Image (tube, grey):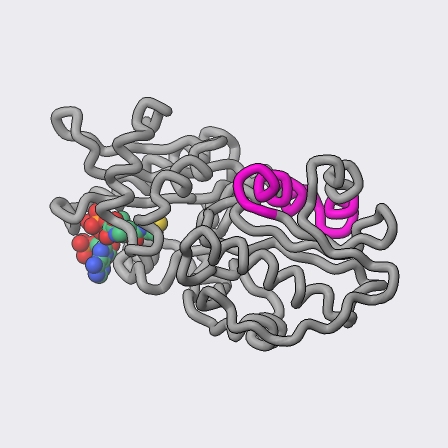
Amino acid sequence: MYTPAHRAAVIELAKRCLLPQDAAEAEAIVDILTRATFGAVSEVDGKLQGVALASAGHKDEAVAHLDLLLVDPAVRRQGIARGLLADVERQAKKRGLGTIKVAGNAPDYAWPGVDVHYTAAICALTAAGYTHERTAWNMTAQLPVKPRPARPAPEGVVIRRVAEADLELLLPMVHEQWGPAWTVEVERAFSKGGVHAAFRGEHPIAFAAWGGCRPSWFGPMGTLPAASGTGLGSVLLRLCLDDQAALGLTSAQIGWVGPVPFYANAADAIIDRVFFLFTKQL
Ligand SMILES: CC(C)(COP(=O)(O)OP(=O)(O)OC[C@H]1O[C@@H](n2cnc3c(N)ncnc32)[C@H](O)[C@@H]1OP(=O)(O)O)[C@@H](O)C(=O)NCCC(=O)NCCS
Protein backbone atom coordinates (compact mmCIF):
# COMPACT_ATOMS: atom_id res chain seq x y z
CA MET A 1 0.00 0.00 0.00
CA TYR A 2 1.25 3.51 -0.79
CA THR A 3 2.30 5.63 2.21
CA PRO A 4 3.85 9.14 2.32
CA ALA A 5 7.20 7.42 3.05
CA HIS A 6 7.24 6.41 -0.64
CA ARG A 7 7.18 10.04 -1.85
CA ALA A 8 10.89 10.40 -2.75
CA ALA A 9 11.00 7.01 -4.50
CA VAL A 10 7.83 7.83 -6.48
CA ILE A 11 9.42 11.10 -7.65
CA GLU A 12 12.55 9.22 -8.80
CA LEU A 13 10.38 6.62 -10.57
CA ALA A 14 8.34 9.39 -12.22
CA LYS A 15 11.55 10.97 -13.55
CA ARG A 16 12.44 7.63 -15.19
CA CYS A 17 8.95 6.90 -16.55
CA LEU A 18 7.41 10.16 -17.71
CA LEU A 19 7.77 12.14 -20.93
CA PRO A 20 10.51 14.83 -20.65
CA GLN A 21 8.09 17.74 -20.13
CA ASP A 22 6.39 15.83 -17.29
CA ALA A 23 9.61 14.37 -15.84
CA ALA A 24 10.93 17.94 -15.49
CA GLU A 25 8.01 18.65 -13.10
CA ALA A 26 8.00 15.23 -11.39
CA GLU A 27 8.17 16.68 -7.88
CA ALA A 28 5.28 19.11 -8.42
CA ILE A 29 3.25 16.34 -10.07
CA VAL A 30 3.78 13.82 -7.27
CA ASP A 31 3.03 16.43 -4.62
CA ILE A 32 -0.24 17.46 -6.24
CA LEU A 33 -1.29 13.83 -6.75
CA THR A 34 -0.56 12.74 -3.18
CA ARG A 35 -2.70 15.28 -1.34
CA ALA A 36 -5.61 12.92 -0.70
CA THR A 37 -4.42 9.68 -2.12
CA PHE A 38 -4.65 5.97 -1.65
CA GLY A 39 -2.64 3.60 -3.74
CA ALA A 40 -0.63 0.49 -4.38
CA VAL A 41 3.10 -0.08 -4.78
CA SER A 42 5.23 -2.89 -6.11
CA GLU A 43 8.59 -3.24 -4.35
CA VAL A 44 11.44 -5.73 -4.59
CA ASP A 45 14.13 -5.67 -1.87
CA GLY A 46 12.89 -2.25 -0.78
CA LYS A 47 13.22 -0.83 -4.31
CA LEU A 48 10.11 0.72 -5.84
CA GLN A 49 9.21 -0.90 -9.18
CA GLY A 50 5.75 0.50 -9.71
CA VAL A 51 3.03 2.64 -8.22
CA ALA A 52 -0.65 3.35 -8.80
CA LEU A 53 -2.18 6.36 -7.03
CA ALA A 54 -5.88 7.08 -6.75
CA SER A 55 -8.23 9.45 -4.95
CA ALA A 56 -11.93 9.89 -4.23
CA GLY A 57 -13.62 12.39 -6.57
CA HIS A 58 -13.80 15.96 -5.33
CA LYS A 59 -16.86 16.57 -7.51
CA ASP A 60 -18.47 13.15 -7.14
CA GLU A 61 -17.49 11.32 -3.96
CA ALA A 62 -18.75 7.99 -5.32
CA VAL A 63 -16.13 7.98 -8.07
CA ALA A 64 -12.48 6.99 -7.72
CA HIS A 65 -9.83 8.67 -9.88
CA LEU A 66 -6.71 6.84 -11.00
CA ASP A 67 -4.19 9.68 -10.82
CA LEU A 68 -0.85 8.04 -11.59
CA LEU A 69 0.36 4.68 -12.90
CA LEU A 70 4.09 4.05 -13.29
CA VAL A 71 6.21 0.95 -13.81
CA ASP A 72 10.01 1.03 -14.02
CA PRO A 73 11.11 0.63 -17.68
CA ALA A 74 13.39 -2.28 -16.63
CA VAL A 75 10.46 -4.48 -15.53
CA ARG A 76 7.68 -3.70 -17.99
CA ARG A 77 5.38 -6.29 -19.60
CA GLN A 78 5.56 -8.53 -16.56
CA GLY A 79 2.04 -7.80 -15.34
CA ILE A 80 3.06 -5.25 -12.68
CA ALA A 81 0.66 -2.54 -13.86
CA ARG A 82 -2.13 -5.13 -14.12
CA GLY A 83 -1.52 -6.09 -10.48
CA LEU A 84 -1.33 -2.47 -9.30
CA LEU A 85 -4.59 -1.63 -11.07
CA ALA A 86 -6.34 -4.63 -9.51
CA ASP A 87 -5.04 -3.62 -6.06
CA VAL A 88 -6.11 0.01 -6.35
CA GLU A 89 -9.52 -1.02 -7.71
CA ARG A 90 -9.99 -3.32 -4.68
CA GLN A 91 -9.11 -0.42 -2.36
CA ALA A 92 -11.55 1.85 -4.19
CA LYS A 93 -14.35 -0.72 -3.87
CA LYS A 94 -13.63 -1.11 -0.14
CA ARG A 95 -14.12 2.64 0.18
CA GLY A 96 -17.54 2.28 -1.44
CA LEU A 97 -16.51 3.81 -4.77
CA GLY A 98 -18.45 2.23 -7.65
CA THR A 99 -16.64 3.68 -10.65
CA ILE A 100 -13.02 4.47 -11.39
CA LYS A 101 -12.09 7.20 -13.85
CA VAL A 102 -8.80 8.13 -15.41
CA ALA A 103 -9.63 11.83 -15.56
CA GLY A 104 -8.17 14.80 -13.72
CA ASN A 105 -9.64 15.07 -10.21
CA ALA A 106 -9.65 18.88 -10.19
CA PRO A 107 -8.13 20.75 -8.44
CA ASP A 108 -5.64 17.96 -7.60
CA TYR A 109 -4.62 16.86 -11.08
CA ALA A 110 -1.54 16.87 -13.26
CA TRP A 111 -3.21 15.91 -16.56
CA PRO A 112 -6.81 15.91 -17.81
CA GLY A 113 -6.43 12.20 -18.69
CA VAL A 114 -3.77 9.99 -20.31
CA ASP A 115 -1.65 11.80 -22.90
CA VAL A 116 -1.88 9.70 -26.07
CA HIS A 117 1.93 9.64 -26.19
CA TYR A 118 1.73 7.30 -23.17
CA THR A 119 0.50 4.64 -25.57
CA ALA A 120 1.57 1.75 -23.32
CA ALA A 121 -0.70 3.16 -20.60
CA ILE A 122 -3.61 3.34 -23.03
CA CYS A 123 -2.96 -0.32 -23.92
CA ALA A 124 -2.64 -1.35 -20.27
CA LEU A 125 -5.86 0.42 -19.29
CA THR A 126 -7.74 -1.06 -22.24
CA ALA A 127 -6.44 -4.54 -21.32
CA ALA A 128 -7.68 -3.96 -17.75
CA GLY A 129 -11.23 -3.22 -18.92
CA TYR A 130 -11.20 0.58 -18.98
CA THR A 131 -13.28 2.32 -21.67
CA HIS A 132 -12.18 5.45 -23.53
CA GLU A 133 -14.99 7.84 -22.58
CA ARG A 134 -13.91 11.32 -23.66
CA THR A 135 -11.00 13.22 -25.19
CA ALA A 136 -9.45 16.44 -23.90
CA TRP A 137 -6.57 18.56 -25.10
CA ASN A 138 -4.08 21.18 -24.05
CA MET A 139 -2.78 23.99 -26.19
CA THR A 140 0.87 24.99 -26.26
CA ALA A 141 2.00 28.61 -26.46
CA GLN A 142 5.61 29.25 -27.38
CA LEU A 143 7.26 31.73 -25.01
CA PRO A 144 7.88 34.59 -25.09
CA VAL A 145 4.63 35.38 -26.89
CA LYS A 146 5.13 37.72 -29.84
CA PRO A 147 4.21 41.29 -28.84
CA ARG A 148 1.04 42.64 -30.40
CA PRO A 149 -0.98 45.82 -29.86
CA ALA A 150 -3.41 45.39 -26.96
CA ARG A 151 -6.92 46.85 -27.06
CA PRO A 152 -7.25 49.64 -24.49
CA ALA A 153 -9.01 48.46 -21.33
CA PRO A 154 -12.67 49.55 -21.12
CA GLU A 155 -13.17 52.87 -19.34
CA GLY A 156 -12.92 52.61 -15.56
CA VAL A 157 -11.24 49.19 -15.69
CA VAL A 158 -7.78 48.65 -14.20
CA ILE A 159 -5.70 45.57 -14.93
CA ARG A 160 -3.06 44.51 -12.44
CA ARG A 161 -1.35 41.65 -10.64
CA VAL A 162 -3.56 40.33 -7.86
CA ALA A 163 -2.36 41.26 -4.37
CA GLU A 164 -3.23 39.39 -1.17
CA ALA A 165 -5.86 42.02 -0.27
CA ASP A 166 -7.67 41.37 -3.61
CA LEU A 167 -8.33 37.71 -2.76
CA GLU A 168 -11.14 38.69 -0.42
CA LEU A 169 -13.27 39.73 -3.43
CA LEU A 170 -11.67 37.61 -6.15
CA LEU A 171 -12.10 34.17 -4.53
CA PRO A 172 -15.85 34.53 -3.83
CA MET A 173 -16.35 35.79 -7.42
CA VAL A 174 -14.49 32.75 -8.81
CA HIS A 175 -16.43 30.44 -6.49
CA GLU A 176 -19.79 31.85 -7.46
CA GLN A 177 -19.14 31.77 -11.21
CA TRP A 178 -16.97 28.70 -11.66
CA GLY A 179 -17.16 26.63 -8.46
CA PRO A 180 -14.87 25.28 -5.74
CA ALA A 181 -12.21 23.54 -7.87
CA TRP A 182 -11.30 26.74 -9.68
CA THR A 183 -11.27 28.64 -6.39
CA VAL A 184 -8.64 26.28 -5.01
CA GLU A 185 -6.65 26.49 -8.26
CA VAL A 186 -6.64 30.30 -8.07
CA GLU A 187 -5.58 30.24 -4.41
CA ARG A 188 -2.72 27.87 -5.26
CA ALA A 189 -1.74 29.94 -8.29
CA PHE A 190 -1.58 32.99 -6.05
CA SER A 191 0.91 31.30 -3.71
CA LYS A 192 2.91 29.22 -6.23
CA GLY A 193 2.57 31.04 -9.57
CA GLY A 194 0.72 34.23 -10.43
CA VAL A 195 -2.73 35.75 -10.88
CA HIS A 196 -3.71 38.87 -12.83
CA ALA A 197 -7.15 40.46 -12.81
CA ALA A 198 -9.21 43.30 -14.22
CA PHE A 199 -11.05 45.45 -11.68
CA ARG A 200 -13.93 47.85 -12.02
CA GLY A 201 -13.51 49.91 -8.88
CA GLU A 202 -12.75 47.32 -6.20
CA HIS A 203 -14.57 44.53 -7.99
CA PRO A 204 -12.77 41.90 -10.07
CA ILE A 205 -14.51 41.30 -13.42
CA ALA A 206 -11.97 38.99 -15.08
CA PHE A 207 -8.92 37.00 -14.00
CA ALA A 208 -6.21 34.69 -15.31
CA ALA A 209 -3.90 32.42 -13.31
CA TRP A 210 -0.88 30.19 -13.87
CA GLY A 211 1.25 27.74 -11.91
CA GLY A 212 -1.42 26.50 -9.51
CA CYS A 213 -0.81 22.84 -10.29
CA ARG A 214 2.37 22.88 -12.40
CA PRO A 215 4.75 25.81 -13.11
CA SER A 216 4.47 25.47 -16.90
CA TRP A 217 0.67 25.18 -16.92
CA PHE A 218 -1.58 28.17 -17.50
CA GLY A 219 -5.11 28.40 -16.13
CA PRO A 220 -7.77 28.78 -15.09
CA MET A 221 -9.04 32.06 -16.50
CA GLY A 222 -12.49 33.59 -16.58
CA THR A 223 -14.32 36.79 -17.48
CA LEU A 224 -17.73 37.66 -16.03
CA PRO A 225 -20.41 37.46 -18.75
CA ALA A 226 -21.08 41.22 -18.52
CA ALA A 227 -17.42 41.98 -19.34
CA SER A 228 -16.84 39.38 -22.04
CA GLY A 229 -15.92 40.48 -25.55
CA THR A 230 -13.98 43.52 -24.34
CA GLY A 231 -10.47 42.11 -24.87
CA LEU A 232 -9.67 41.67 -21.17
CA GLY A 233 -9.06 37.93 -21.47
CA SER A 234 -6.32 38.39 -24.09
CA VAL A 235 -4.50 40.96 -21.97
CA LEU A 236 -4.72 38.82 -18.82
CA LEU A 237 -3.58 35.69 -20.65
CA ARG A 238 -0.55 37.48 -22.03
CA LEU A 239 0.39 38.89 -18.61
CA CYS A 240 0.43 35.35 -17.24
CA LEU A 241 2.44 34.01 -20.18
CA ASP A 242 4.91 36.88 -19.72
CA ASP A 243 5.35 35.80 -16.07
CA GLN A 244 6.00 32.23 -17.22
CA ALA A 245 8.49 33.40 -19.86
CA ALA A 246 10.27 35.40 -17.14
CA LEU A 247 10.82 32.10 -15.28
CA GLY A 248 12.85 30.95 -18.27
CA LEU A 249 10.14 28.65 -19.66
CA THR A 250 10.16 28.34 -23.45
CA SER A 251 6.55 27.16 -23.68
CA ALA A 252 3.40 27.09 -21.59
CA GLN A 253 0.65 24.49 -21.49
CA ILE A 254 -2.87 25.89 -21.60
CA GLY A 255 -4.57 23.09 -19.74
CA TRP A 256 -7.83 21.31 -20.57
CA VAL A 257 -9.01 23.78 -23.26
CA GLY A 258 -11.69 25.29 -23.73
CA PRO A 259 -12.04 27.94 -26.42
CA VAL A 260 -9.44 26.93 -29.03
CA PRO A 261 -9.86 30.00 -31.32
CA PHE A 262 -9.43 32.36 -28.38
CA TYR A 263 -6.01 30.94 -27.42
CA ALA A 264 -4.95 30.55 -31.07
CA ASN A 265 -5.68 34.25 -31.65
CA ALA A 266 -4.42 35.65 -28.36
CA ALA A 267 -1.17 33.68 -28.02
CA ASP A 268 -0.60 31.80 -31.31
CA ALA A 269 -1.23 28.63 -29.29
CA ILE A 270 -1.65 25.29 -31.05
CA ILE A 271 -3.48 22.14 -30.01
CA ASP A 272 -0.68 19.90 -28.87
CA ARG A 273 -1.16 17.34 -26.12
CA VAL A 274 -4.26 15.16 -26.47
CA PHE A 275 -5.60 13.12 -23.56
CA PHE A 276 -7.93 10.11 -23.45
CA LEU A 277 -10.24 9.95 -20.42
CA PHE A 278 -11.23 6.47 -19.30
CA THR A 279 -13.85 4.91 -17.07
CA LYS A 280 -14.50 1.49 -15.53
CA GLN A 281 -17.36 0.20 -13.39
CA LEU A 282 -16.07 -1.59 -10.29
C1 LIG B 1 1.80 1.97 -18.68
C2 LIG B 1 2.73 1.16 -17.79
C3 LIG B 1 2.43 1.53 -16.35
C4 LIG B 1 2.44 -0.34 -18.03
O1 LIG B 1 3.19 -1.10 -17.08
P1 LIG B 1 3.53 -2.68 -17.27
O2 LIG B 1 3.84 -3.21 -15.93
O3 LIG B 1 4.54 -2.81 -18.32
O4 LIG B 1 2.14 -3.26 -17.79
P2 LIG B 1 1.66 -4.80 -17.67
O5 LIG B 1 2.87 -5.69 -17.85
O6 LIG B 1 0.87 -4.99 -16.42
O7 LIG B 1 0.73 -4.92 -18.92
C5 LIG B 1 -0.60 -5.37 -18.83
C6 LIG B 1 -1.18 -5.40 -20.23
O8 LIG B 1 -1.23 -4.05 -20.75
C7 LIG B 1 -0.95 -4.07 -22.17
N1 LIG B 1 0.32 -3.37 -22.41
C8 LIG B 1 1.18 -2.87 -21.50
N2 LIG B 1 2.22 -2.26 -22.11
C9 LIG B 1 2.00 -2.36 -23.44
C10 LIG B 1 2.72 -1.94 -24.58
N3 LIG B 1 3.88 -1.29 -24.47
N4 LIG B 1 2.20 -2.22 -25.79
C11 LIG B 1 1.04 -2.90 -25.91
N5 LIG B 1 0.31 -3.34 -24.85
C12 LIG B 1 0.80 -3.08 -23.64
C13 LIG B 1 -0.83 -5.54 -22.54
O9 LIG B 1 -2.13 -6.01 -22.87
C14 LIG B 1 -0.36 -6.15 -21.23
O10 LIG B 1 -0.64 -7.52 -21.14
P3 LIG B 1 0.34 -8.60 -21.84
O11 LIG B 1 1.75 -8.20 -21.53
O12 LIG B 1 -0.07 -9.90 -21.20
O13 LIG B 1 0.06 -8.53 -23.31
C15 LIG B 1 4.20 1.44 -18.13
O14 LIG B 1 4.41 1.23 -19.52
C16 LIG B 1 4.65 2.85 -17.78
O15 LIG B 1 5.05 3.11 -16.64
N6 LIG B 1 4.62 3.76 -18.77
C17 LIG B 1 5.07 5.13 -18.58
C18 LIG B 1 4.22 5.88 -17.63
C19 LIG B 1 2.81 6.00 -18.08
O16 LIG B 1 2.45 5.97 -19.24
N7 LIG B 1 1.94 6.24 -17.10
C20 LIG B 1 0.58 6.59 -17.40
C21 LIG B 1 0.43 8.05 -17.39
S1 LIG B 1 0.40 8.64 -15.76
Q: Is residue 144 placed above or below 67 in the rendered structure?
A: below
Instruction: Decide if residue 222 is on the left or right side of residue 156.
Output: left
Which image quadrant is residue 278 in?
A: bottom left
Q: Range of the magenta residues?
A: 173-194
Placement of the N terminus among the 4 image quadrants: top left
Q: Residue at x 52, y 47 (%)?
A: 211
Residue 28 visible in the picture: yes
Number of callouts: 0
Residue 135 visible in the picture: no
Q: Is residue 53 placed above or below 174 in the rendered structure?
A: above
How far across and down, in percent of the image, does residue 180 sit? 68, 42
Placement of the C terminus among the 4 image quadrants: top left
Q: Nearer the viewer, residue 31 or 241?
A: 241
Q: Kindly report the secondary structure that dominates the magenta region of the rendered protein.
A: helix
Q: Residue at x 23, y 44 (%)?
A: 71
How far across and down, in percent of the image, does residue 162 sit? 69, 45
User: Does the segment drawn in magenta span residue 192?
Assistant: yes
Instruction: Decide if residue 235 is on the left or right side of residue 200.
Output: left
Which image quadrant is residue 75 in?
A: top left
Q: Nearer the viewer, residue 128 or 215?
A: 215
How far across and down, in percent of the image, does residue 177 sit? 77, 51
Q: Residue at x 43, y 66 (%)?
A: 274
How far across and down, in percent of the image, does residue 237 sit? 61, 62
Q: Residue at x 56, y 51 (%)?
A: 210
Q: Nearer the viewer, residue 5 or 233?
A: 233
